[in-house]
Image (spheres, helix red, strand yellow):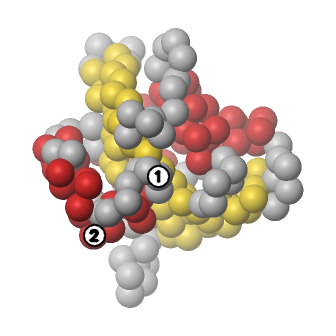
Amino acid sequence: MAIEDHTLIVKSIAWTTEADTQAFAQAMATRLLASLPGRNALIQLHGDLGAGKTTFARHFLKALGVEGRVKSPTYAVVEPYSVTDTAGDTLNIWHFDFYRFNDPDEWEEAGFRDIFASPGLKLVEWPEKAGEHLPTADLDIHLELLDNEARAVTLSAHTAAAAALLP
């Protein structure tokens, strides 16, 4: 049952090692590739510097089938990818990092509205830097650094498709 803020499901988990992060990312990628509605999703990654947002994103993108080096989009702001599944369908993916935004209006000025309106997966680090410009996320992943490797993770699914992605 949905609660007032339209969150369908909230889960709290822990990743005690990077291997835990990788296993979660692989499980979520498997579910996303098997779920047609989940392929058009906005996933937002929240957390302080060093919390593991980019590490999760790299593992997730690799598990989705991105080949080669997965670069952090910190300086480029966005890195586009596409993968083809076993049925021959293409999934467009955009990995954003808004850390360097000084003003939320930079999102609008960069012309990202068209990308966010198009089909595909949008994975966003530092979404709060884009302010109110971003559409509502399907899934919010909040990461909190506990020590060098351990993370407290809170997952908030706001759509049924996002809830289906959660292992």
Q: Helix, strand, or loop for circle 1?
A: loop
Q: Which residue is mark 1?
A: 99
Residue 112 vertical position relative to residue 12 in the rendered view, above or below = above
Q: Residues within 10 Å of mark 2 (few under 14, many from 20)?
A: few
Residue 135 vs residue 5, the one in the foreground: 135
Residue 39 vs residue 164, the one in the foreground: 39
Left or right, 99 with reference to 145: left
Any part of residue 157 in sight? yes
For the residues labelled 2 and 1, the Cα–Cα distance comes to: 15 Å
Residue 94 vs residue 23, the one in the foreground: 94
Q: Which residue is mark 2?
A: 132
Q: Which x, y percent locates residue 30?
A: 52, 33
Disc marking residue 40: none
Any part of residue 32 in sight? no
Q: Amino acid at mark 2?
A: Glu
Residue 161 vertical position relative to residue 103 in the rendered view, above or below = above
Q: Residues within 10 Å of mark 1 (few under 14, many from 20)?
A: some
Residue 65 vs residue 103, the one in the foreground: 103
The mark closer to the camera, 2 or 1, is 1
**Comes first in the chain, label 2 or label 1:** 1
- Which residue is outermost to the front? 102
Q: Are marks 2 and 1 in contact (CB under 8 Å)?
A: no
Quadrant of the rendering where the N terminus is positioned: bottom left
Q: Amino acid at mark 1?
A: Tyr
